[in-house]
Amino acid sequence: MTISTFPPSVAVAEKMADPARRSVRIWLGMVAALIVLMVIVGGATRLTGSGLSITEWRPVTGMLLPLTETSWLAEFEKYRATPQYQLLNHGMTLGEFQFIYLWEWGHRQLGRLIGFIYLLPLLWFAYRGVVRGRFLATLLAIGLLGGAQGGIGWIMVASGLEPGMTAVAPIKLMLHLVAACGLFVAVVWIAVGLRDRHARIAVPARLRITGSIAVAAILVQIALGALVAGLNAGMSFNTWPLMAERLIPDSFTLLQVSPWWRNLVESTALVQFNHRVGAYLLLALVVWHAIDAARAAPGSKTVRMARVLAGLVLAQAAIGIMTLLLFAPLWAALLHQAMAVLLLGHAVAHRRMMSPARVFPVQPASA
């Protein structure tokens, strides 16, 4: 059974808007790719301990690098007043400081670049009448959330500048990463929705439900992964499938902090265990979803995308195990993080393609 085609007048309008739709889709695809890169660079910044090297938030003047030895020494002096330097990096040379400074500066510059690449084309599309109405309002809201992400990033950094802190607060690191992934989900959802419309195989509602649960579960796994990174939990319990020589560690191992609920974000053992269990549940979910899709819509693109989703989750689990067993080297940890975002993107695209076709308010550019 296929979804009925649009009336002739709508079909003509759709055909006229195709070039404009393609332009908007390419633009959003570029933004999505840059967000993936941003997450990878952010992960490298965290794992190299570079995130606290710039101790001020200067949205405009912060674009400029220190260009003289005097300005470099001034920045270094600010960093030397931080707990991270005093407790962890005491005796660091200027050259070593410049290395971590450039990582953090590059991370912030990439954020600014994404802002420009999002805002300027959006203004042009709005000016030419390509996007309008609710669609324009939606795109503007995404842009505002992207701008707020810079503020969330600074809140995260400021948490690491507090007395006694040598890294950012894990829960604020998690918030920053989940917010970035939320923006990525929104951009991918819209971009995929702008693909050319053809008749689609109708799928049962349960496939859309399990597809949505898969997207949510991947986001939860990413959030748990951020806590693992924030607590350096990947450097402990480096065995699999056993953890502390058991499949399920005892409560003394898991519940190290009082009151008990703080263990959810502060216990390295419980955070890692939750991440492991989440991976098992996610894998079971996507395998079941792929089997169900094959029964409900055999031979369809939905089945192919569901199988790819299951394969990606399996590959991600293998990368996670490898990262754990190798004591989380930088390259493996970054691969694991990048794969998580790509997996999220595929899950969102898969879920979007199962939604009924609809006309998007994209118009040909005005003369």
Image (tube, rainbow, N blue to C red):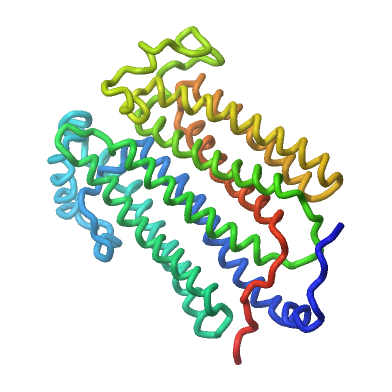
User: Which residue is the extreme one toward the top?
Assistant: 245
Up/down of 233 relative to 309, above or below: above
Question: 124 left or right of 15?
Answer: left
Question: 293 left or right of 19?
Answer: right
Closer to the camera, 208 or 341?
208
Tell me what residue is drawn at x 62 percent, y 77 percent.
362
- Where in the figure is residue 345, as x and y percent of width and height? 59, 49
Give the total number of marks visible in the rendering: 0
In which quadrant of the rendered view does residue 190 lie?
A: bottom right
Tell me what residue is drawn at x 40 percent, y 20 percent.
269
Question: 267 left or right of 273?
Answer: left
Quadrant position of the N terminus in the picture: bottom right
- Where in the figure is residue 100, as x and y percent of width and height? 31, 42
In which quadrant of the rendered view does residue 258 lie?
A: top left
Tell me what residue is drawn at x 85 percent, y 44 percent.
298
Tell me what residue is drawn at x 35 percent, y 29 percent.
231
